Amino acid sequence: MAYCISCGTKLPDGAKYCVECGAQQPSAPAQPMPPVYRQTYSSGSPMQPTYMPQPYPQPQYLAPQPRRSYVGLIVGICSGAAAIAIVLFVLFTSILNFSGERTYSEALRKYTNIMAYGGGEDLIDLMHPDYVDYVIREGYCGNRGELIRELHDETAYSVSYFRDTYGSDYKFDYRATDTYFYDRTDLEYLNDQLFYDYGFRSCATEAVTVYYDVYISSSTTIDYESTYFEAMRVDGRWYIVPAEFWY
């Protein structure tokens, strides 16, 4: 039931004008529309609507992953590289087979021990490679192996002499008494001799003569003799001067 907004007369529902005063009445407010739902029908009851709510996607949470450390990988690579470098160095040096010694004292010690106790095949390491080529080229030895055997036999003979003279328990030692280093004139003369006599392609940059006493002792005898040793430095290595050999 509605009433006139002007005179208050009772009006039927939906009246637009008052029947007493003729005043226009306000229209009724619009009713909100009911919500619309998505409907599906099942095969069992085609006329029965079924409300199917659509689920909202749930957020996915991932556990944090630990950061990967590369320290172990780097250490492994470095260790592997170092191992490879060591192997290559050993192979490289074994292929080159460096001869000579780093100091003239080492060359003298090696030479003295060979002459006292044998191992003459190692004397070839104290020969400059060009001199070895000269010995083979001139026909003193057929090849390097034959030269090594001859050096071994020569020192074996001297060892046999020491053993027969002083007994099998002999000991060999030396003491340097004087050392003479070649001056410039002597070096020039030595290099000329190396070139004309042996065909050396390298030049000695240093040379020395060491005078020393050799001491031989055993359970029954002590003896000594004075001698000398000549060495030259070529390409950073020390070799015996070729004139000391018998070729």
Image (cartoon, rainbow, N blue to C red):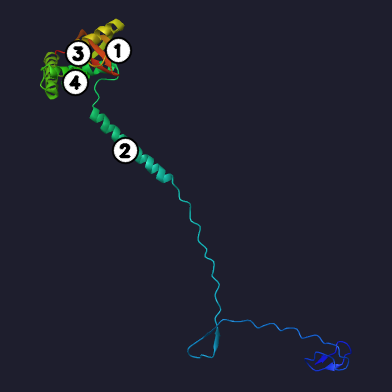
**Front residue of this view, candidates 23 and 209:** 23
Q: CA distance from mark 4 to mark 3?
A: 11 Å
Identify the mark nearer the N-term, 3 or 2. Answer: 2
**Front residue of this view, candidates 54 and 228:** 54
Identify the mark nearer the N-term, 2 or 4. Answer: 2
**Whole-percent x and y of residue 48?**
54, 89
The quadrant in which residue 100 appears is top left
Element under disc 2: helix
**Mark 2: amino acid:** Ile
Asked if the residue under mark 2 is in contact with the one under mark 1, i.e. CB atoms within 8 Å, the reply is no
**Whole-percent x and y of residue 59?**
54, 66
Q: What residue is pinned by disc 2?
A: 84
**Mark 3: amino acid:** Pro
The quadrant in which residue 237 appears is top left
Q: Residue at x 36, y 40 (%)?
A: 79
Q: Which mark is residue 206?
A: 1
Q: What residue is pinned by disc 3?
A: 242
Q: Which mark is residue 124?
A: 4
**Mark 1: amino acid:** Glu
Q: CA distance from mark 3 to mark 2?
A: 39 Å
